[in-house]
Image (spheres, rainbow, N blue to C red):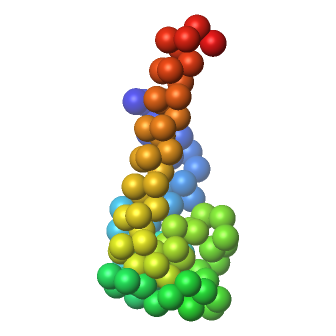
Amino acid sequence: VINFFLFFFFLPYRMDCLISFLDSWQDCYNIGYQLCQALIGFGRGDWAGVGLGSGIQKLFYLPENHTDFIFSVLAEELGLIGAISIILLYFFLVWRTFSIGRIAESAKN
């Protein structure tokens, strides 16, 4: 636990990132910019989304959208229904992986 606090204490930019994550709207135009834009993308998506390929956050506002915040781009384009569907697909993939592993273990493979 002490190492965790020292990790943030000796490098101040890490503490700024942590504080920005906890309240990104406090400094929305500086260190919290990317997180605020991701949340705006989620909000723009609404229930059904704006359509696949029709999101504007990835074009003008969200830097590094293809790596860090790809889920917010997906939520903007597919909406809450699409975002929940993706989460359910991940749960299905993990469940299926463990069930295949259990079958392989019982067959001693």
Residue drawn at 58 percent across, 8 percent down:
108
Above or below, 35 relative to 59: above
**Image position, residue 33 (x, y; %):** 51, 78
Above or below, 10 relative to 66: above
**Image position, residue 37 (x, y; %):** 49, 81
**Image position, residue 12 (x, y; %):** 54, 55
**Image position, residue 107 (x, y; %):** 55, 11
Tally of numbered tags: 0
Which of the pair 8/54 is nearer the observer? 54
Going by the picture, which residue comes out furthest to the left? 47
Going by the picture, which residue comes out furthest to the front? 107
Residue drawn at 46 percent across, 79 percent down:
78
Residue drawn at 58 percent across, 50 percent down:
11
Above or below, 91 relative to 23: above
Looking at the figure, which quarter contains the C terminus?
Answer: top right
Q: Is 58 displayed left or right of 88 in the figure?
A: right
Which of the pair 105/84 is nearer the observer? 105
Looking at the figure, which quarter contains the N terminus?
Answer: top left
Above or below, 4 relative to 9: above
